[in-house]
Image: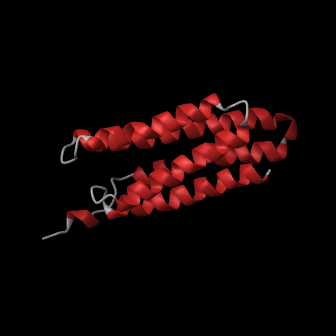
Amino acid sequence: MVDASESPLPRGMPALGWSGVLPFAGALLAAFAWPAWSGFAAAVFVSYGAVILSFLGGARWGRGLAGGVAPARFVEAVMPSLIAFAALLLLHTPPAALALLAAGFAIWLAIDLRDPLWPPAYRRMRLGISVVVLALHAGWLLV
């Protein structure tokens, strides 16, 4: 019998997941290449980060709809969107918005890594992508 928990991710999922890093990297590179546009690039970075953090909550919500989770998990699934919304409200202060988003990504990475409902292959992919995303957030905070 094959252990379904070690099954590979659906075809194309890793490529799509990793391609989600490109807007983060592009915005950061644009800020370095064209300093006059760094404010716009920061707004792009924060806005995209808010969308992706909300997406992570949506994935958790979808997993909950598939069954097998406690009702409190739906409350947990809404939290990334609330953090993302708060970060958007801080767009006028990019360092605060970036720090809040980074905290949200780190918290949801920790939650996803300990969640037995996610297959190990998904958790490994999330770890790699999140480490890069958090490093890009740190890059912005060091600018």
Residue 134 rendering spot, x and y as whole percentages:
60, 55
| Figure check: 123 above or below 83 | below
Residue 46 rendering spot, x and y as whole percentages:
64, 38
Residue 24 rendering spot, x and y as whole percentages:
64, 45
**Frontmost residue, 46 versus 34:** 46
Q: How is the image coloured?
A: secondary structure
10 left or right of 88 in image: left
**Frontmost residue, 7 versus 41:** 41
Residue lying at the far left in this picture: please name it: 1
Residue ID at (52%, 56%): 129
Number of numbered discs visible in the structure rendering: 0
98 left or right of 50 in image: right
Quarter of the image that includes the N terminus: bottom left
Residue 142 rendering spot, x and y as whole percentages:
77, 54
Residue lying at the far right in this picture: please name it: 36
Q: Quadrant of residue 64?
A: top left
Residue ID at (52%, 38%): 83
Q: Quadrant of residue 33?
A: top right
Residue 21 in view? no
Residue ID at (40%, 55%): 111
Residue 75 in view? yes
Q: Quadrant of residue 116?
A: bottom left
**Frontmost residue, 136 versus 109:** 109
Residue ID at (39%, 36%): 78
